[in-house]
Amino acid sequence: MPEFKIDWRIPCVVTNDERNCPIWKMRLNGQWAIACVVAKKGYRTSIWIVDSIEIHRKNTAGKFSIHGKMRLGGFQLNVSHVIVTGCSIIEISSNINMTIPPAQYSRLHGFVKISDISEKFASGLVNREFKKTVQLTSLGELSNDFGRLLDPESSRFADVTLKCGGASIPAHKIILSVRSPVFAAMFANQMKESLTNEVDITDIDVSVLRALLVYMYTGKTYDLTSSSAADLLLAADKYQLQDLKMVCSYFLKETVSFQNVWRMLVLGELLDEDLKSFAMDYICNTCGKISVLESMEEWRALRKERPDLALEISESFS
């Protein structure tokens, strides 16, 4: 049962497969490869859109289970599929629709395990790995089904409306309550929101609220940026979504730069001690000396707005 570690920097060279689809492709070994099906955004542009992710194989004989976990930017992917005899390509994630701007890169990283289950099926033996694959596939389908509850055509099943930034978003009390202790308390008591079936949300941008709802319904995040991840981290803290806080914090660490580390530092001070420590270490390691730091505009702004944090960083150089 080979396990392949994946750490792939994209975009890379574009090729066309046997279907004449443009793809980025990385070989796992002589038999297996992973591919991103891509398209250009417009005719004269260097902006790429990742549409889906696939597993390819050369030899089409045999039945194999494929499972693992990967991340592409802010997109989380739980892989759980079976490729059957005669099939050379299997799609492991669809409708990603992730945009990669010009001169920028992203990383697909994680792992996949590929197991030959042909003989075990032929002999009638129960394959533990396959049972796990089936279960994960079912969970993936369940996530997609819950995501469809956010589609406008499913709004007739909603029993609460979230009002934010001029938008009215239909939602479902039971799902919000199960996922968030804050919503659970709101709807369990005779509060205005419970009586009117409307929740006014004034301190979150509507795009952040939509991303929050997608995670609450599906457990997935899409198209995160350092800015949107920071905003989503604040929203996740407000509604006590601990798993989403971890996802956002991890993404911020993965995409840290000297431009966004200052906001990470302040967020860490408010919400996440580990994120704060990471940001402080990054600043100190990048600058090397306090004299280098003192020449920077970001540092002068921090000393003015958050002298307590500036003092902590200064002391770490001594």
Image (cartoon, rainbow, N blue to C red):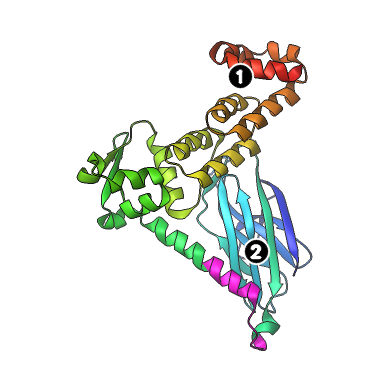
What amino acid is found at the position of numbered circle 2 in the picture? Answer: Ile
Q: Quadrant of residue 196?
A: top left
Count the marks: 2
**Camera-nearest residue between 71 and 102:** 71
Q: Secondary structure at mark 2?
A: strand
Left or right of 233? Residue 130 is right
**Camera-nearest residue between 193 and 298:** 193
Q: Residue at x 63, y 16 (%)?
A: 310
Q: How far separated are the C-alphas under marks 2 and 1?
A: 47 Å
Q: Residue at x 62, y 27 (%)?
A: 261
Q: Which residue is mark 1?
A: 309
Q: Tell me where residue 148 appears, x and y as whole percent.
A: 38, 58
Q: Residue at x 74, y 60 (%)?
A: 4
Q: Residues within 10 Å of mark 2 (few under 14, many from 20)?
A: many
Marker disc for residue 173: none
Q: Tell me where residue 215 appears, x and y as whole percent.
A: 46, 49
Q: Is residue 300 above or below residue 190?
A: above
Left or right of 105? Residue 317 is right
Q: Quadrant of residue 86?
A: bottom right
Q: Is residue 283 above or below residue 242?
A: above
Looking at marks 2 and 1 on the same chain, the residue that comes earlier in the sequence is marked by 2
Q: Tell me where residue 297 appears, x and y as whole percent.
A: 62, 13
What amino acid is found at the position of numbered circle 1 in the picture? Answer: Leu
**One can see residue 1 in this view:** yes
Q: Residue at x 58, y 55 (%)?
A: 77
Marker disc for residue 55: 2
Look at the image and give the residue range highlighted in magenta: 122-137
